[in-house]
Image: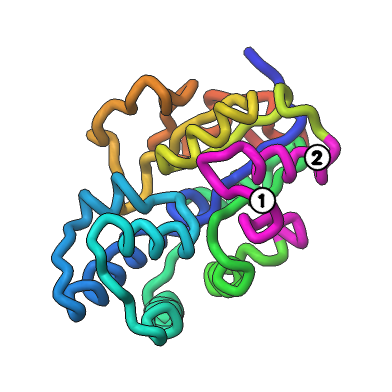
């Protein structure tokens, strides 16, 4: 059983059940411009990537010149839906409350979006200021920069760090950082029947529910918390 000194959680699709909302919103907004893509394409190409990377991919792959107000409209519409529909992933709060080692969040979301998201689902106090975004590093996921930056800020070696990710992009980033990576497949956009990962994005373990988190890593549970 490997011990860890730090756990890094992705935010969207791990702590909060947001990826299905974001994907549906993006599909709808692009359809208004005449571009038809499906949720499978979004999951395969956009999940875990920052907004600027997603927009650049759309321009490059489809030759679509997005209107100047597209980003603002998409972000504002998305946050409006978050305010009514966003939910915390089941059992996440229990896990965070029972952690015996430090933890932080490393996300491709913008600082404003992650701040609002954590606040809406009641995780702000638990996470504190330990939130790191792709705006803080030169290259976002799948580059290892963000995870390495987070580990450095938390004062922990990469090989003593556990990453919880949902996206192939995030898995690749964690592996490139030399960290242990578990893939969480319990949010609405994935599931236990999620296809097997490609060789370059193979996690060390799959996690279907946070109710099972401490079964796989019992040393991460605080002795003050009941088993």
Kindly indicate whether the residue at mark 1 contacts the one at mark 2 (C-beta within 8 angstroms): no
Quarter of the image with the N terminus in it:
top right
Question: With respect to residue 12, does 55 lie above or below?
Answer: below
x%, y% of residue 170? Answer: 49, 41
Q: At 45% from the left edge and 34% from the top edge, which residue is drawn?
A: 183
In screen coordinates, is 94 left or right of 154? Answer: left
Question: With respect to residue 166, does 200 lie above or below?
Answer: above
What number is the disc on residue 138?
Answer: 1
In screen coordinates, is 144 left or right of 198? Answer: right
Q: Is residue 89 visible?
A: no
What number is the disc on residue 152?
Answer: 2
Q: How is the image coloured?
A: rainbow
x%, y% of residue 203? Answer: 46, 25
Residue 148 in magenta? yes
Among numbered discs 2 and 1, the one appearing first in the sequence: 1
Q: At 37% from the left edge and 81% from the top edge, which residue is drawn?
A: 70
Q: Quadrant of residue 224?
A: top right
What number is the disc on residue 180?
Answer: none
Q: Is residue 82 visible?
A: yes
x%, y% of residue 179? Answer: 63, 26
Q: Quadrant of residue 132?
A: bottom right
């Amino acid at each position: 059983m490997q011990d860890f000194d730090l756990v890094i959680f992705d935010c969207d699709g791990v702590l909060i059940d947001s990826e299905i909302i974001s994907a549906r919103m993006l599909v709808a907004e692009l359809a208004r411009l005449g571009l038809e893509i499906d949720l499978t394409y979004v999951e395969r190409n956009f999940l875990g990537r920052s907004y600027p990377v997603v927009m650049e991919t759309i321009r490059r792959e489809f030759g679509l010149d997005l209107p100047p107000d597209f980003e603002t409209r998409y972000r504002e519409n998305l946050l409006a839906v978050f305010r009514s529909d966003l939910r915390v992933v089941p059992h996440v709060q229990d896990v965070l409350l029972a952690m015996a080692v430090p933890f932080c969040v490393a996300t491709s979301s913008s600082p404003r979006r992650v701040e609002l998201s954590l606040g809406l689902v009641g995780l702000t106090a638990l996470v504190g200021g330990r939130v790191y975004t792709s705006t803080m590093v030169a290259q976002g996921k799948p580059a290892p920069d963000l995870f390495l930056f987070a580990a450095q800020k938390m004062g922990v070696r990469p090989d003593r760090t556990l990453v919880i990710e949902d996206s192939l992009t995030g898995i690749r980033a964690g592996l490139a950082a030399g960290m242990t990576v578990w893939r969480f497949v319990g949010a609405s956009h994935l599931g236990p029947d999620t296809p097997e990962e490609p060789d370059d994005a193979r996690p060390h373990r799959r996690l279907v529910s946070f109710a099972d988190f401490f079964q796989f890593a019992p040393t991460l549970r605080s002795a003050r918390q009941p088993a």
